[in-house]
Every structure is written in structure tokens, then in C-alpha cells.
Amino acid sequence: MKEKLLAFVRAGLWGTNVPLSLCPTTEDEWNQLLHESCKQTVQGIVYDAVSRLSNVSFPSSFLQNWAELTRTMEARYHQHFMIINYLSARLGAVGLEPIVLKGLALAAYYPQPNHRVSGDIDLFFGNVENAEKANRAVEQWGTPVQRGGDDETVYMLNNTVVEHHGQLITSHNLFLKKSVKQQLAQQIVDGSAFQYVKINGVPVKVLAPLQCHLLLMTHSLKHLLNEGIGLRQLCDVAMFLKAEHGNLEGETLRKNLKDWGIYHWANLVYSFCVKHLGLSEQFLPYKFDLSSYNPDKLLAEVLLTGNFGQMDERMAERSQGGDSVFTAKRMLHNSVKFMRYAPGDALGYPLRLTYLKIKDIIHLK
């Protein structure tokens, strides 16, 4: 099923046709394709490829049921767009302009934006102070806001999770220089970290290409080391690289990745996009030796964990200690396994979470 799933994902991303030899032939295989697509949150992308098939027999009501799932996805995309417009207007009234991270900003790179599965709505306000100002404004509307670690807060709006971020990049790289963070902070202050794009004809403030790429790389690494990483996050990178190819200066980007300690992680992701997602090498931002990276190792982890690791089959083996014990073991395993690609984060992220856990225990006592 691995090759079938990847073939359908590639066809959905690039508008090509799946070879008949890679199409499922039984009802069980079709259902497994749908299951794996949902596990990786790429069911909308795969549906686009499935709906283009001709001379293929589908199980009774199968395509109709998948189409209904897709319509639900499209409605959720529209709902997110409306919530972002609502928040932009309400928060704009108190002098705040939210920057949309991930989500709809990345969906815009896809041939069918409303077929990229939407998760939470992530908003950034430039700094911790503005984020807290936004939190208080939301609370004044009567909406409870839950404050968490790393200057992140969460609340529900119209049955949708909205997150406010006080920091753009949360890195636990032990070797990260202070000057690198300061450079990003200056880009945020002077506005060069942002741009406006039109989504459904409405101007929306999002990250500029360099900063968006940095967030994609650091966020995907965080998920690899913690919850688990799915195909959707890697599809985001592939679509971003193709769309922004002319707007990324290769050597500037290479230096940026090295400064943040994720150069080899980015190269591993690039090699994955080329080998498994069908991204043309011409869209890579700079040249490097693809043969020195092993994207198959990353693929194996992706297929096991799925998006956020919630459908990781190894979860069934977890002990009575529950999800936290299992997650800690998976984190340590992945930190060792992918150490060479981002050593600072592979060491720092588990240490950070261990510190927070010990702090919570001491606080409870």
C-alpha cells in the first residue's frame, strides 16, 4: 500500500494520473487507501487523484462517501477563512493585526487549496506583549483562553481551535547563537518577515518566504521529535518550494538554515520531496548531494506515526503509564535516530520537556 499511497499523493499534488498498475483492485485495498490517506491527513489530495481515474471500478458508494468527506473538508476550509476575517476585524479594532501561520497560508500553494486538510488556526502578533493583548481582547468577548508554555494560548471559536503565538520560532537548539534569534526579531520589528497575499480575493498578512521556510523546517522537526510527522507537512514543503522557487535566494537560505542548526534536516526533507513526492530537482533552492541523505528512513517514520502520531500503530503497545510514557520513548528514539540531521534540537528538545515535567512535579508537591 505504501507505493500506492505515494503514487496517489504525487498525482494529487501535480495533477498527473495514477498508473492503473498502482490502483487498488479490491474493496479492502480501496478502504485501506482511504484509511492511510486520513492517517496522513492527505485525503483531499488523494481524492483529487482518485476522482480523475477513468475505466476503474470502485466499490459501491465508495467514491460518493469519499466525496462527502471532501465536502466536509471544503466547508471547514471556508469556516477557517471566515473566522480569520472575523478575528482580523475584531482584533484590528484594538490595534492588532494577526499574521496567519501555516493553515490557509500554506493551502494557497496547492492546486485545490480547500483540499488541504485544515487543523488549527495559528496566529502570530509580532511579540509576546501583543499576543497577550489579543488574549485579553478575546477574554473580554466572553471566550475562555487557556495559557500554556512557550508563550502559546488556545481557545475555541465556532468549534474551531485557535492558537495565539507569542514567538514565531520556538527552538530548543542547545547551540543556537543569541545573535541568530536577534536577527529574526529585527526582521519581525522592521516588517521584512511579512507579506500580504490574497486568499479568496482578500488580503491576508502571512510570513515572507524566508521566514515561512524557517517555520516549516523547525515545526516539522519539532513534530518528528515529539508527536510524529505526517505526509501533509512534507507535502506543504514540496508545494512551498515549487511556488516560491523564484523568491528564495539559495545561498541566503543555506546560511539561514546553518545558523539555526537545521541545514541537514532541511536537506533530508528536500531529498524526501524529490524521491517520494515527485518534486522536480529544479525547484530545490540550492544544490547539494542528494545521495548523501536517506529519505527512506524518514518515510518509514512518517508511515508509522501519521499526522501528530495519533494513529501510530505502536500506540497499542504502550504500557499502563499511558501516552506520556510512550511519547517520551518515541521522542528519545527519534532523537537518537535523527541526531545527525539536527543535533542541537535532538539533544535540546527532550531535555527541555524533561525539565518542564520535573518542574510540574515539584510544583504539584
Image: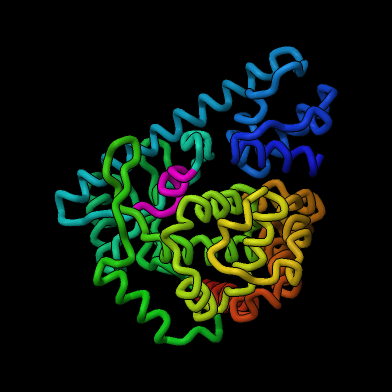
Query: Is 347 a magenta residue?
Result: no
Report x, y in % for residue 183. 36, 79
Quick one: quadrant of the N terminus? top right
- Residue drawn at 73 percent across, 68 percent down: 293
- The image shows residue 114, relative to residue 231, as above or below, that is above
For residue 277, side relative to residue 248 (left or right): right
Q: Quadrant of residue 332?
A: bottom right
Q: How many marks?
A: 0
Report x, y in % for residue 82. 32, 35
- The image shows residue 177, relative to residue 299, as above or below, that is below
Magenta-highlighted residues: 100-109
- The image shows residue 259, relative to residue 248, as above or below, that is below
Report x, y in % for residue 10. 66, 41
- In the picture as drawn, the residue positioned furthest to the top comes out as 60
For residue 56, side relative to residue 256 (left or right): right
- The image shows residue 26, relative to residue 32, as above or below, that is above
- Residue drawn at 63 percent across, 23 percent down: 51
Quick one: quadrant of the C terminus? bottom right
324 vs 73, nearest the viewer: 73
13 vs 349, nearest the viewer: 13
- Residue drawn at 60 percent across, 47 percent down: 232
For residue 346, side relative to residue 78 (left or right): right
163 vs 274, nearest the viewer: 274
Res. 365 in view:
no
Q: Quadrant of residue 290?
A: bottom right
Report x, y in % for residue 224. 64, 62
- Residue drawn at 60 percent across, 34 percent down: 15
Res. 275 in view:
yes
Q: How is the image coloured?
A: rainbow
